[in-house]
Every structure is written in structure tokens, then in C-alpha cells.
Image (cartoon, rainbow, N blue to C red):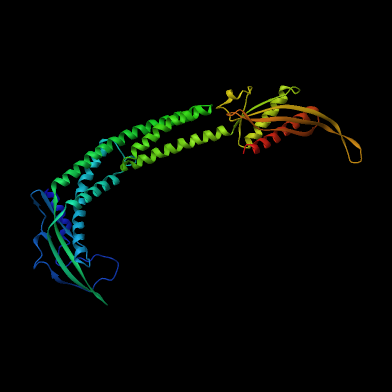
Amino acid sequence: MKKLFLFVLLLFASGCATAPRIKSTGIEKPLEEKLTWSSHKERPSWTINEPYSEGEFLLFVGLSDKLDTEKKSRDNALSSAITNVVKFIGTDTKSRFERIQTAHGLSTDILDPTITTQKLEDQLSKALTRQIKARDWYLEKWKAKYRSYSEDYFLVYALCLVPKAEIDKIIQEQIVYQQKVGTAAEAANKKLVEINSSLLETKQKKISEYTERISALNQVLKPAIELKTEVDAYEELAPISKKVEAVINELQSGIEKARERYKKTVAINLTSQDLGSDAVKVTITELASKLAEKGYEAVIVESTETNQLRNKASKLIIGTLSAEYMGNRIELPGGKVMKSLEQTRATIEVKVIDVETDTAVTSKNVSEKDFGKSLSESKEKALKKAAGSTAEYISNQLK
């Protein structure tokens, strides 16, 4: 208690000399200041002597700013006393909070000590506003003269009573609360480590099925959202709340990307009665390549049963291939015929099916003609050209 009194003495001793200090405001300073009236013949000793205790109360002195009315000055003096009590008690209590933080192994990126101190000061201010009483007043009225005008102002000293029990109660409540915050922060940090570990493990897994990937991400997302709710109950845990929020955003983004990837995944099944497997393979490869350029991911499947394709692709592309040899002569205007490269017309009869609903989205016959030095070359070029046109049509229909 001796230290408490000494601290307040140092706060006010320098401001209790005969002439008040001028508070710098950046405006014109008075040429002269003169005391014109005071409530006592002499300043009471309590305005400059060490404060003391009285029964169940602590006594502090509040000094007002220079204000133009007595009421404003009285209110300001009370506020000054409250501010000084709060700052002193807050300084002492802050060190206790720091010890609690250290005991739980918490750093400032998990627990915000600024909010901790501010909450204590706010609580003390509210409580003291209700509890503080002025035991005595000392008022002075001064006249300040400037170059072109003069004005009067008041200075008020308030000797205030502060209940010891109320201060002790608030401090104890805050210590208990901060212990609770520390425990919550420590538990939250452990959970966050576990969530990050699960997220990393999920990202490293090779999961092909859409629903399985979404499920895996949601299994990590659920506890992350629950943790966010828990830490948001404490303002002091704002730093860790931001970390949890970042994890949630990453998970939600991953889920959204998985959904978009699923929408852009198509299954391809092309067949032909007349063309060999090599020709079919060339066409499918070209179709998949051209769809990839449009942002689609293609998987080649043997089955056209949509119930077997669900969660692997959102659309199924089925089609039949055919090729017609067009010869190696072309007719010029006027009826003249001349020899040319080998010509082949390739046709893809294609249908796009929505896998989820098992309904047709669109269908089309695409035919393209191309030339080659040999029949096989012209056939391959025509098939690739038809595959490219088919990919263009499908991508436009699926936008």
C-alpha cells in the first residue's frame, strides 16, 4: 500500500504548485494568469501531501483540466482520479496477467495482452464511476490574459474515496477470468495444431472420388468452425481466431475447388464398328486434349452406366466414330477433274449425358474432311479435326 500511495504522490505533486501548468494545445498561450478566487484561503494539504487510507477506503486526488464552468471541472476532476487509480492498478495487474500467460506457454500471436489490459481498465472505470465519492473539494478560479482578449477558467482538486473491497473484487474477478482465458487459449492452440495436421494429411492423400474428397475436407472443416466459435467467445483470443479463420478459408476454398473440378470432369466413351482400336484411341486422345484446353479434365471409361460414374465425373460423353474415304481426285470449276491428296471424311455422332440425373444434355453429329499423303494419314487428320470440333461444341454447350 505504501508503494501505491507513493505512486499517486508522484503523479500529482508536480501539478500542485502555486501556479498551474499550462496544458499545451497548440493555440495562443496566455501572457498572464492570475488567481481571482478560491474555495479556501489556502490550498488544503491533501492537494500536495501523500494520499492516505481511511477505514475501508483508499484516497486519491484528481485534478481537472482548465475548463470554463465549475460543473465541468468537478466532473473532470473525478474522471482524473478514476483514470489515475485505473492506470496504477492496471500496471500492477498487468504483470499478474503476463505471469498467467507465461504459465500457459502462450505468445502474443495466440493471446492479445493489449485487449486483456484494456478490458480490465474498462471494467475498473465502470465500477469506480459507480463507487467513487468525493470526500473534499478545492476550487480555484483563474483569469488568463491574451494579446486581444481574456478568459476565466476553473481548476478543481477532488479528494476521492475508493472502496478497497470493490477494487480487490474486480482484480480477483479479472485474475480468475484471465486464468480461464489462458486455459482456453492453450486448449485452442492444441486443437489448431491438430486441425492443421489433419489438413496437411488430407491434402497429401490421393483421392479420386469427388464425394470422398469433399467428405475428407468437411471432416477437417467441422472442428475448425467449432474452434472458431470457441475462441470468438474471448476478445483476447483474436490472434488465434485469425489463424483459425485462415484455415477455415483454405478448407472452404478447397471444397469449392473440388466442386468446380468435379463440374469440369467428363468421362469419355467412344466406339466404332468400322475403325480399329488405334483410330478410336487417337480420336479419344485428341478429344481429351482439346477439352483440356477448354478447362475440362477427361477420364476415359469403358462403362457407360451413369451409376458407376457418379462422384468420378459430372458428364458422360458417348459417341460413335465412322470414316468415309473420299478418293484422291477433286473436281475443278468447269468440270475438270485433277488428282489430289487422299481425302477422308470423319464423323463423330456424340451425346453428352448428365451423370447425376442420367439425362441427355445435348447431342450432335460432327463431320470434318481432311487430306493426307496416304489414306491412313488423311483418316487420322480427319478424325483429329472432328474431335477438335466436337470439343468446341461440347465446351460451348456446357458453359
Residue 230, above or below 48 = above
Residue at left offset 49%, top offset 35%: 254
Q: Is residue 395 left or right of residue 27?
A: right
Residue at left offset 27%, top offset 39%: 101
Residue at left offset 45%, top offset 31%: 218
Residue 142, above or below 322 = below
Figure quadrant of residue 285: top right
For residue 352, say whether it is visible: yes
Figure quadrant of residue 12: bottom left
Q: Position of residue 283 (x, y in %)?
A: 70, 29
Q: Is residue 109 left or right of residue 22?
A: right
Residue 259, above or below 157 = above
Q: Is residue 259 left or right of residue 113?
A: right
Q: Position of residue 157 (x, y in %)?
A: 15, 61
Q: Is residue 117 left or right of residue 133?
A: right
Q: Position of residue 235 (x, y in %)?
A: 32, 43
Numbered marks: total: 0
Figure quadrant of residue 158: bottom left
Quarter of the C terminus within the rendering: top right
For residue 48, say whether it is visible: no
Q: Position of residue 127 (x, y in %)?
A: 20, 49
